Amino acid sequence: MVQLENTKCSFLVCLVVCVLICSAIYLNAKIPKISLPFTDWSSQTTPAPESCDILPPATPGFTWQQKDHNFSYETKPDANCTLLQSDLHFIMEPLSKEEEDFPLAFIITIHKELETFVRLLRAIYAPQNVYCIHIDAKAAEEYKTSIRNLVGCFPNVFVVSVNVNVTYAGFSRLQADINCMKDLVKSPTKWKRVINLCGQDFPIQTNLELVRYMQGPEWKDRNITPGIKQPPTMKHRTQFQYEEVKGTHVAPKGKGQKKGPPPHNLTIYFGTAYYSLTRPFVEFVLTDKLAKDLLEWSRDTFSPDEHYWVTLNHMKEAPGSYVEGEWQGNVRAIKWKDQEGTAHQGCKGRYIRDICVYGIGDLQWLIESENMFANKFETASFPEALHCLELWHRHKVLQHAMVPIQPSWRLTTEVKVINSTLISKPDD
Ligand SMILES: *[C@@H]1O[C@H](CO)[C@@H](O)[C@H](O)[C@H]1NC(C)=O
Ligand SMILES: *[C@@H]1O[C@H](CO)[C@@H](O)[C@H](O)[C@H]1NC(C)=O
Ligand SMILES: *[C@@H]1O[C@H](CO)[C@@H](O)[C@H](O)[C@H]1NC(C)=O
Ligand SMILES: *[C@@H]1O[C@H](CO)[C@@H](O)[C@H](O)[C@H]1NC(C)=O
């Protein structure tokens, strides 16, 4: 069989060479595209972003092309899902036994940009995992419909059963996660950890790397919620009452009304809103009286998602808690403006609310950071940054795969130009 395959290959390679020589001699290279075996005709390709230098060097003589720089598509309720999965380059098989044995749950809160969501979902998608999508209640109906049509093609992706209007720094941000958790504990998937993401995040690590990180000695059976005891500069967040105003922002309630002390004499912590939580911890959050009392008390605080998880995770009683934990845990790579010159050397994109929206020049720093995910990306302002990281990430994912790779899983292909004709490398 192998020999037959080799003979077939040799024949095809000969054929390619013949066609090329013929075209060069007889057609004087006037024909822009020649039908060749091995060429991927199912999707157009365009060059990878020029400054995408995080990609490994291409084979000498070849350059990187990306398969669907122009992805204009519409989602239909009656889509052919097999076709949609392959057109959008979703990986529909577990890539290793190790990953299959450690399913993850994801909570993704989104409100706009279908294309960005597709790129994020296909980067983290694996058939053994489960995904709860929280769409902001005030998002456009058209957007909600598109997302519903898309996730309808994946049995392990669903839209949250109760969605809320999400306000930045408001209690609704926390409520969105909790609503997803309530659905996730009912899912048939035996997920081991839950990770939350927003539409502006993108993974740096592969699913296999995430699984290994969470099973490693530092985090085995432990939640990751980086944070410290509430510093004095953050006290106002829980000493005074706040409220969400018109679904747009959070403001002090009345004339600076004071709040009572936390329930059960809890010590309040402060940290990131991003986490990786064990399943028993999530069950504790949803059922324990203490956790529920803290949730109720947090309703009129400022940015409660930045104290709720961290506070609970510092309690001895909470499953998987880390009472002595501080900022440990590589949950997010973020370039904060006030850490310029220390943690990083500036933002190559631009700062929004003192957080860097990445440009392509920030990617080297990101991939060296060892974090699970990066925040923030904005397709509207810096599309190449997201595209380039996506190509790099998928390349790494496929390199880690322990199963044969389907052609549709690739986002890049190596090509060379001969007589104005693009030729893909045979194994792409
Ligand atoms: C993308 O592809 C569609 C359909 O092939 C085409 O109509 C459109 O002009 C393309 N857009 C860009 C920006 O190339
Ligand atoms: C969906 O598309 C695939 C691939 O083109 C095809 O084999 C299959 O028959 C289609 N399924 C339906 C239900 O149309
Ligand atoms: C969200 O806010 C809109 C107004 O902006 C309102 O019409 C709608 O009922 C709200 N939805 C929920 C679920 O609160
Ligand atoms: C509350 O906790 C503080 C220390 O955090 C302790 O000094 C105080 O006695 C506690 N109060 C009650 C009522 O348990």
Image (tube, rainbow, N blue to C red):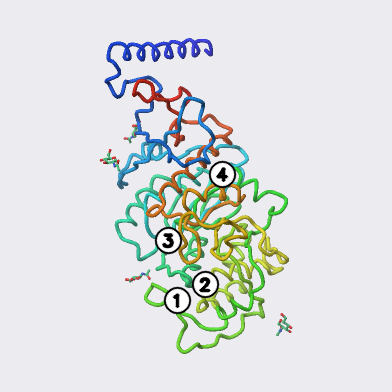
Q: Are marks 2 and 1 in contact (CB under 8 Å)?
A: yes
Nearer the observer: mark 2 or 3; the answer is 2
Q: Which is nearer the N-term, disc 4 or disc 3?
A: 3
Q: Which residue is mark 3?
A: 161
Q: CA distance from mark 2 to mark 1?
A: 9 Å
Q: CA distance from mark 2 to mark 3?
A: 23 Å
> Residue 345, labelled with which disc?
none
Q: CA distance from mark 4 to mark 2?
A: 30 Å
Circle 2: residue type: Ser
Q: Is residue 82 left or right of residue 404?
A: left
Disc 1 within 8 angstroms of ligand 3 (CB): no
Q: Which residue is mark 4?
A: 206
Q: Which residue is mark 2?
A: 303
Q: Which is nearer the N-term, disc 2 or disc 1?
A: 1
Q: Which residue is mark 1?
A: 250
Residue 263 shows up from this direction: yes
Residue 315, position as x, y percentages in the image: 69, 69
What is the secondary structure assignment of the residue under circle 3?
A: loop
Circle 1: residue type: Val
What is the secondary structure assignment of the residue under circle 1?
A: strand
Q: Residue at x 68, y 68 (%)?
A: 314
